[in-house]
Image: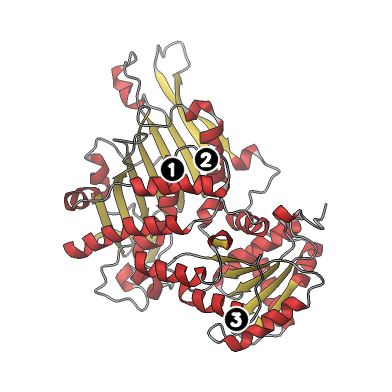
Amino acid sequence: MTRHTRSSSAERTDIDLALFGALGDLSRRKLFPALYHLDREGLLDDDTRILGLARQDLSLDEFRSQIEAALKQYVKPAELVETALTRFLERLSFLTVNFKSVDGYSSIREWRETASSERPLVVYLAVGASLYGDICRYLQESGSLDDESRVVVEKPIGYGLESSKVVNDAIGEVFPESRVYRIDHYLGKETVQNLIALRFANPLFGTQWNQNHISHVEITVAEKVGIEGRWGYFDEAGQLRDMVQNHLLQLVCLIAMDPPANLDADAIRDEKVKVLKALKPFTDDMIGRDVVRGQYTAGTSDGQSVPGYLEEDDANISSHTETFVAMKTEVANWRWAGVPFYLRTGKRMPEKLSQIVIHFRQQPHYIFDPDQRALAANKLIIRLQPDEGIRLEVLTKDSGLDKGMRLRRGPLQLDFNNAFPQARIPDAYERLLLEVMKGQQYLFVRRDEVEHAWKWCDDLIAAWKDRNEPPRRYPAGSWGPVASIAMITQDGRSWYEDY
């Protein structure tokens, strides 16, 4: 396997990575497995070092032992290669640091000074957003940063527009926007990357991607789990802040944006911002008709009884926090005028599912069996999880001498697992970490994207507060409140559920 020994200055991958929150759940489940895979694939420079930072007092051997255990838990056994695992663990260093005190940060500077050569520092903040400002400031005050240092931050960026400005201002006092990488892991998924190629590399879709040919768009992000012990965070956030403000709106942007001038980061993000600016605000009448809030009650999941949201550990039994949101919105511009976007996301759904469905308009003149008129529209299904792939539903003649000109619906399908059986589909964090190392920002969210998304969501949250209505109940293991079905049915449509 070819190892990378040095990259060009434009895409250097020889870095020092300082990972704050190195013993947290995100680091164990996602970040260290992603870094291991990059190392195994030969995509980490030989000189790259990884520094774990946490408040726990551990020796280096104890830290490496914990990360090895995490890798054995979250990486498939067939993908754990002893030589690669040993090499990766040898890259790791560890420091115990109180993140809220500048005193311990000098040890980070001293660790950097032990490097055999100069290389950029990438700071990954896998901690709460309330710590972002302190960590950035103390890194600067301790002399740990240089002119190439970058910072990676996780969502949520605040709990609304004003708090996001506070967080981003604190980061911006130390890092210019060109060196800030705000992660939305959906943007690192293979299928999301293919959405850009599908739209802009294929005239078949490029010429059809507008209100003349598309009747409506569905986006579903369903979670099978409940709040998983995150009551304190989730009850303040809710599903709108937790999922719609970032994941779903990013998907709306990628579906609805105009072609960028090129694949440069700002060219893509400029077009995404235009979409966010064009999102139609909700009036009071629209909120009553086109938005559904829900909260799960006790039910079943995988045949097992599960508690309702208000019955979870440490629950506030009077909480009106939503665990489900469905809505109809519109991108008010020339390309999408009159095309509804139906968004749906919730916890304790029957399946873990993330998919986009593009519904194309029917032919203006229909000549086949009137009873099959409902079939006569193409659909493009873009599956993000659990099985990534793209499927175009087309109509053909049903085979057989006795069928006449009966139609049947069938797929033209790209299933990544079947199409590339020898290739492992990389996790989103692998791609995102690699792009950070290269200094490429096109998969990351710019500050003005965050703020426009928050402005739209804040207006909706304020309207909910004024209405003071409790969320509608739905049993765990269902597809949400009945009202979400009524919302789309009133337009003569239904949620696509051919799973």
Q: CA distance from mark 2 to mark 3?
A: 42 Å
- Indicate the amino acid at tag 3: Glu
Q: Quadrant of residue 319?
A: bottom left
Residue 147, percent across and down? 65, 67
Rendered view: 31 above or below 268: below
Quadrant assignment, res 35: bottom right
Q: Nearer the viewer, residue 47 or 3?
A: 47
Q: Quadrant of the C terminus?
A: top left
* Disc 1 to disc 2: CB gap under 8 Å: yes
- Three-letter code for the amino acid on which mark 2 is drawn: Leu
In percent of width and height, residue 20 lies at 59, 75
> Disc 1 versus disc 2: distance between alpha carbons?
10 Å
Question: Residue sitting at 38 percent across and 56 percent down?
Answer: 453
Q: Which residue is tagged 3?
A: 141
Residue 5 left/right relative to 405: right
Q: Position of residue 297 (x, y in %)?
A: 30, 64
Q: Secondary structure at mark 2?
A: helix
Badge 1 is on which residue? 356
Please tell me whether residue 270 is drawn above or below residue 309 in the rendered image: above
Instruction: Please report whichever mark, 1 or 2, sits nearer to the chain's N-terminal start.
Output: 2
Question: What residue is pinned by disc 2?
Answer: 195
Question: In the rendered view, does 303 fall on the left or right side of 364?
Answer: right
Mark 3 or mark 1: whose residue is earlier in sequence: 3
Q: Position of residue 423 (x, y in %)?
A: 69, 45
Front-most of residues 86 and 111: 111
Residue depicted at x 64% and y 87%: 57
Tell me the SS state at disc 1. strand
Q: Quadrant of residue 115?
A: bottom right
